[in-house]
Image: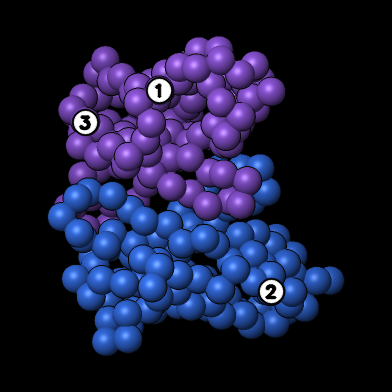
Chain colours: A purple, B blue
Amino acid sequence: DTAVSQTPKYLVTQMGNDKSIKCEQNLGHDTMYWYKQDSKKFLKIMFSYNNKELIINETVPNRFSPKSPDKAHLNLHINSLELGDSAVYFCASSHPLRQRDSPLHFGNGTRLTVT
Amino acid sequence: RKEVEQDPGPFNVPEGATVAFNCTYSNSASQSFFWYRQDCRKEPKLLMSVYSSGNEDGRFTAQLNRASQYISLLIRDSKLSDSATYLCVVNLNFGNEKLTFGTGTRLTIIP
């Protein structure tokens, strides 16, 4: 029944490690996103993919590499984790935004803590 | 000027009261507008879309003022369960397909 699911829910790791977060949606949407919510609760877009193609990369460090094997999946791999990467990462999906009234549907978030 | 700006609050409002939030946006060509709600340690969830003519969903009313570039959310007869952070979301239409979030307005309903 879950519309947008991401795993893991919690991720605790040490600086310098490499980790991945997975996301899948069963809503039939063409567009998927990664958002980061920092300690001040501000939600900022990181990446957007449309039908497996990268369309937005918001000046995110290249330690972050998204991968979309198909339009229902968008994974996020992070190399050489830093303390400042600690945040909640949300995956989301939607119909193309040029269609009016295309809201985002979010996964339940991955709380990443880098120690 | 921030692209999407909200008063962060917190708003502490007695149960049963009416409360209203505004959100301003920077680009007059902005298209879609939404209000989202986020509970503590949860994902944002769509509360309602905002249409040009204004729209209502039960106790919630959303309005768009294009001339002054703001949207508003009115909550009538507030309930304890309305306590949450309310996020204003706008497609600023800068030529790329993304939705920009405001910083959120925190609302606490007091018994």
Which image quarter is the C terminus of chain A in?
top right
- Local crowd at mark 2 within 10 Å, few (<14), some, or many (≥20)? some
Amino acid tagged 3:
Leu
Q: Which residue corresponds to mark 1?
A: A63
Label 2 marks which chain's residue?
Answer: B
Which residue is painted at 38% across and 44% down in the image? Answer: A45
- Indicate left or right for A5 with B50 as reference: right
Which residue is painted at 74% across and 69% down in the image? Answer: B109
Q: Which residue corresponds to mark 3?
A: A54
Amino acid tagged 1:
Arg
Q: Which residue corresponds to mark 2?
A: B11
* B18 relative to A62, above or below: below
Residue B39 or B57: which is nearer the viewer?
Answer: B39
Residue A79 or B36: which is nearer the viewer?
Answer: A79
Amino acid tagged 2:
Phe
Label 2, secondary structure: give it.
strand
- Local crowd at mark 3 within 10 Å, few (<14), some, or many (≥20)? some
Q: Residue furthest bottom?
A: B67
Q: Residue furthest right?
A: B111
